């Protein structure tokens, strides 16, 4: 019943780059390596096969178009990889503890271990427990021992919260500590389902993405929840390229991960460690040599407006008015004809007599469209 999931976390998926889509497909994998597994893009530092990943822990496997973490004793699937956000979405298992009317009982726990560069995301996940005489704990280590837990009590069927809220009557939720690399989900021995087993023989507990779970009273029935989520529930792990801050990481050239030109290092806001990004005006994969490519801003007028003639430059773009027209700033204002008579008219309208309100409106209407 006890299930250990040594997650050597890892994985791959759709990169949530920027909202800016490049017309030319940017290479995300190391040269000569697989770019995708099924629908999932596997961006370096993640990779499939020898020589294709940055270091141990980032070596994912691809089986039947599905991506899995390395060294997971149960099959921990990777659903999504955020390259710039430093997160991956994976499946983790549900712990359960049962006490049936026929006298049978089981006690289960779920344990997760990660490599040093992966930790359970404190911001993205919650510990959730389902049951009516249930106290669930999440114990783990960051640098210290961290323990949290939640209580759900509903000693008869009528006490269950049927509204779908996780309110402590059939379901409870609590926040988890940051930087957890190993954890164990367990139940308090002194609370068990014996007293409620007529309608709720089992207690369940899991760590899942915040806001993902919606409680239903039917989950209190035997195996409803575990049958529905056989492959586990979606959880989020934070990852970093290294556990040191940027100013230390950059000192070791042989291990420093931000190797692309026009890339930069930043300290993760979520965990201890650093990540890489492309500099402003560049997009792609900062972890690959030449992974950061110039953005052709002129192809994306919504993000990079230009009301005149747009021309791309390395790391930026310029915007100018066509001959015979002018604008205070063609990136924000349309270019208007620049004839002497037009100018005189505009001046008259702007400074002209107070009665000419339409003129004022005309002048301000020439501003930016937002
Ligand atoms: C790929 O995406 C499509 C559309 O979202 C989905 O129907 C399909 O099941 C996915 N395939 C895999 C292998 O994930
Ligand atoms: C994997 O995906 C490809 C393309 O979508 C498809 O042709 C192939 O049959 C899939 N393989 C398996 C094992 O599902
Ligand atoms: C992961 O698996 C590899 C190859 O089997 C092994 O060398 C390595 O020690 C394992 N790592 C952990 C943390 O178990
Ligand atoms: C992967 O993440 C992106 C961005 O957050 C999201 O739009 C997409 O739905 C996710 N894909 C899956 C399969 O969860
Ligand atoms: C930090 O956590 C937030 C909330 O889960 C997430 O949106 C973000 O992508 C994470 N990483 C970074 C680098 O901000
Ligand atoms: C998790 O907790 C259970 C119950 O306390 C214990 O028996 C088990 O050894 C723990 N597992 C790990 C991996 O620490
Ligand atoms: C089941 O209930 C009995 C009676 O209260 C108790 O002795 C036993 O420890 C329970 N089993 C579990 C796994 O909680
Ligand atoms: C630099 O990184 C390499 C490779 O990871 C490592 O073997 C070496 O010990 C590091 N050097 C220092 C001074 O930390």
Image (spheres, rainbow, N blue to C red):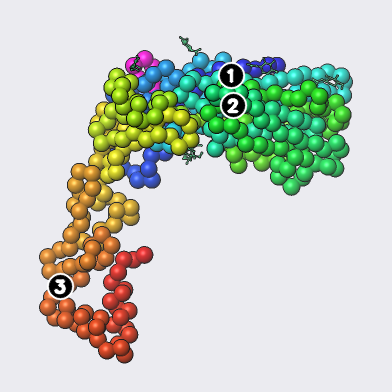
Residue bearing mark 1: 5
Give above or below for 334 relative to 75: below
Instruction: Kindly check if marks 1 and 2 are in contact, taking CB atoms under 8 A apart as contact.
Output: yes
Residue bearing mark 2: 92
Does the magenta portion include 50?
yes
Residue at 36 percent of width and 65 percent of height? 370
* Magenta: main secondary structure: loop
Residue bearing mark 3: 338
Taking 289 as reference, is 322 left or right?
Answer: left
Which residue range is magenta in the image? 47-52
Taking 319 as reference, is 43 left or right?
Answer: right
Image spot of residue 337 (x, y percent): 17, 72
Mark 1 surroundings: few (<14), some (14-19) or many (≥20) residues within 10 A: many
Q: Nearer the viewer, residue 241 or 245?
A: 245
Q: Secondary structure at mark 3?
A: loop
Mark 3 surroundings: few (<14), some (14-19) or many (≥20) residues within 10 A: some
Location of the N terminus by quadrant is top right
Instruction: Kindly check if marks 3 and 1 are in contact, taking CB atoms under 8 A apart as contact.
Output: no
Q: Nearer the viewer, residue 74 or 115?
A: 115
Residue at 55 percent of width and 25 percent of height? 142
Q: Secondary structure at mark 2?
A: strand
Taking the image in four quarters, ligand 8 sits in the one at top left
Q: Nearer the viewer, residue 64 or 69?
A: 69
Q: Earlier in the sequence, mark 1 or mark 2?
A: 1
Give above or below for 352 relative to 314: below
Image spot of residue 109 (x, y percent): 68, 21
Q: Earlier in the sequence, mark 3 or mark 2?
A: 2
């Amino acid at each position: 019943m006890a299930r250990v999931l040594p997650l050597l976390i890892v994985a791959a998926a759709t990169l949530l780059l920027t909202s800016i889509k490049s017309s030319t497909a940017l290479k995300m994998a190391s040269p000569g390596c697989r770019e995708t597994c099924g629908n999932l893009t596997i961006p370096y530092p993640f990779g499939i096969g020898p020589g294709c990943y940055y270091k141990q822990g980032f070596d994912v496997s691809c089986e039947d178009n599905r991506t899995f973490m390395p060294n997971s004793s149960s099959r921990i699937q990777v659903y999504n990889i955020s390259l710039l956000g430093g997160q991956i979405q994976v499946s983790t298992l549900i712990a359960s503890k049962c006490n049936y009317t026929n006298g049978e009982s089981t006690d289960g726990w779920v344990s997760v271990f990660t490599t040093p560069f992966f930790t359970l995301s404190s911001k993205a996940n919650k510990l959730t427990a389902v049951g009516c005489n249930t106290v669930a704990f999440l114990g783990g280590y960051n640098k210290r021992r961290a323990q949290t837990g939640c209580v759900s009590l509903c000693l008869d069927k009528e006490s269950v919260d049927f509204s779908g809220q996780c309110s402590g009557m059939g379901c409870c939720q609590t926040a988890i500590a940051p930087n957890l690399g190993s954890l164990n989900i367990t139940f308090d021995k002194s609370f068990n389902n014996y007293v409620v087993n007529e309608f709720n023989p089992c207690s369940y507990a899991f760590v899942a993405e915040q806001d993902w779970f919606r409680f239903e009273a039917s989950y209190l029935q035997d195996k409803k929840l575990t049958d529905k989520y056989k492959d586990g529930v979606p959880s989020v792990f934070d990852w970093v390229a290294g556990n040191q801050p940027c100013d230390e990481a950059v000192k070791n050239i042989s291990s420093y991960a931000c190797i692309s030109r026009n890339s930069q290092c930043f300290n993760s806001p979520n965990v201890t460690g650093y990540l890489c990004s492309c500099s402003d005006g560049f997009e792609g994969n900062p972890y690959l040599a030449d992974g950061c490519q110039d953005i052709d801003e002129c192809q994306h007028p919504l993000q990079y407006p230009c009301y005149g003639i747009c021309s791309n430059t390395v790391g930026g773009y310029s915007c100018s008015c066509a001959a015979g027209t002018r604008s205070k700033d063609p990136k924000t204002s349309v270019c208007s004809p620049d004839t002497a008579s037009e100018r005189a008219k505009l001046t008259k309208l702007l400074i002209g007599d107070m009665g000419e309100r339409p003129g004022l409106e005309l002048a301000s209407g020439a501003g930016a469209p937002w």
